[in-house]
Amino acid sequence: MTIAHLTTPVAGRLARAHEWLRGTSGGLVALALVVGGGAGAGAVVFRYLILGFTYAFTGHRDYSATGRAAYGYFHGLGFWFVVFTPVVGGLLYGPLIHVFAREARGHGVPEVMLAVAERGGRIRPQVAVIKSLASALCIGSGGSVGREGPIVQIGSALGSTLGQLTRVPESRLRVLVACGAAGGISATFNAPIAGVFFGLELILRDFEADSFGVVVLSSFVADIIGRAAFGSHPFLHLPGFQLHSPIEYPLYAGLGLVAALVGVAFIRVLYGAEDAADRLWRGPEWLRPAAGGLLLGLVLLALPELYGVGYPPLEHAIRGNYVLWLLLALLVGKILATSLTIAIGGSGGVFAPSLFMGAMLGSAYGIGVHHLLPGLTGPAGAYGLVGMGAVFAAAARAPITAVIIIFELTGDYRIILPLMFAIVVAAGISNLLSRDTIYTLKLRRRGIDILRGRGANLMQLLRVADAMQPLPAALPADTSLNEVIDRLSDAPTDGLPVTDAEGVYRGTISSQQVEEAMRENALDADAGDLAQDVPALQAGETLEQALSALLRARSGLPVVGGDGRQPVGWLSHVDVLRAYSARLQQGIEQAQRQPAASTPRHEPGPISSTLARLRGYRIVDLELATDDPPVGRAIADLAWPPRSTILAIRRGDHAFEPKPTDRLEQGDRLTVLVPAAAADDLVDAITTTSDAAESDRRT
């Protein structure tokens, strides 16, 4: 027997296994379990990296827990050593991020949300490695950020990489990204339920049954690995919750109000610091973390409790070990230190800082109300526990995740009602004060608004008149059932319009309706009795509007003219596909600088050929959220990536096909057909070009 005879059965089995992974529910479950295992292991490795780098820089496992007398390894500098550790760390992780994975800069979750919403779940494989090293170096050298955002990006990158290797469809790739995010949160917090809701509420943004099941499995596996490495006890040792009297419910509502103000202030200070750093820094980007690290070090010199993640000071606050002025100083200091860490190009999350701020705010608030109503209120730490969830809910606007994670951290059911009350108030007021969350604002500043959905699509540009076919001969309302059967048997469509004696449209009759009449032996029925009373389509309607009507109907639909009475054409699902295919092919030909197709859009288009030619292309949605360039520029004046074209622009509620001379306006949402290799850099490319053009114009 030859080698070829041996390898053919093996190749066949591998192909069947691959198809099983890609296309079956069992395959998705298997992939989710692997992703959960990888996310759990990644969380363990990441936490040990943070411990290792923190020890290397300070000589302590967690410098924020040591107090102000700890000098670390740099005894000659005394307590001043804390000023220089962020500089040294910045010199290490700054070039690492700049050279290998620039998306590893910042707090991580927005990049994952973007990958799910706009890129089909695609995340570069190297992101997991670079994010692990960069974030561990940043936190270990004093960066006042959290480890949860990075582990979300690390787990999501692992899920995306596995999905891309197995070539799963985009719908499944997004689910695997959510599985990785859920696994990371589960293993890090030892909170499997919170991990599930984080992945669904913030990353995937849906709660479908299929998605829910596999995300649960991934979170479960990751939590098992986390517990095996770190034990089953919660990573925070928090006191029990106490509610002394019903009068405290309004007080917790007041805490929710104050938490909303703090959450919104955190968002604005964070991105304000980024803007300030962008305006002031003129050196190379890889050096920015080291230069800015000197400012961060001065903040840590004043408040060493802000070094790194800062969970030990959080526990001290909840247990009532801090006085009021120190709680307020740590609250303001954390907002400043975290914003500064992100602004200088650091890598770390904002999840843990929001919990830290909530603990400080809630404990300070609790001291205040306990002083006013000493016999009716519980200890300040109870308000600190609720404040943790309220500030996070105000900043991230993820109330379900906020409730679940605080409940899992405390394990105390008595906290649920006050917690829910405060979180609902915080999230609601935050929504009134700011349209964006701490995650979505980062994307909108880059021209992407995932809260508004995608931009204009071709279905909003194409009209029913572009896709409709000639009207089949209508059935008079008095046509007998036998004649209806004969006409439908010979008709090119699965339905026919029905008109009255004056030729006015009265409804549509489909083959399914005729079959139902035959089963019921309704031999005396005529076309008028069987006609389905569905509204006809207007020739000027968009195909997006027409699709809603086609989905409700059992067949194609007639198209009426301007008088709204006389049918002039016929539209079916196949006609919509043909029109879309022809217009998309026209866009591809335009992108490739070939002559446009001469075939009218409403005639049949080569759908399979179009899909084959789309390989290597992506459709990118780009929102011009600010008045900065390229706003004000003509489309033809911008250096778009080669072989790309703008398919559509949505301006307000109106979508249109752009001309080269059209000038872009603030708020425009562009739908761009672009080669996949250039898709991720589209925003930077046209912005850089516009800035250069503006500089030349001024010169």
Image (cartoon, rainbow, N blue to C red):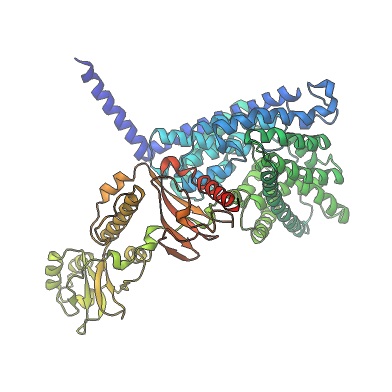
Where is residue 57? Give x, y as percent.
73, 24
Q: Is residue 555 left or right of residue 403?
A: left
Q: Residue at x 84, y 41 (%)?
A: 322
Q: Position of residue 215 (x, y in %)?
A: 49, 41
Left or right, residue 655 beside residue 393: left
Q: Nearer the viewer, residue 310 or 482?
A: 310
**Most foreground residue, 543 or 582:** 582
Q: Which residue occupies 29% across, 76% down?
A: 561
Compared to 696, does 189 lie above or below?
A: above
Residue at the extreme front of the image, as rendered: 699
Residue 234 shows in the view: no
Which of these two is toward me, 224 or 160? 160
Quarter-of-image position of residue 451:
bottom right
Residue in view at x 81 percent, y 37 percent: 303
| Residue 661 visible to an observer of this rendering | yes
Left or right: 259 as drawn, with respect to 593: right
Residue 315, percent from left and from top:
76, 38
Horizontally, residue 75 falls left or right of residue 527, namely: right
> Which residue is found at the position 86% from the left and 46% from the top?
324
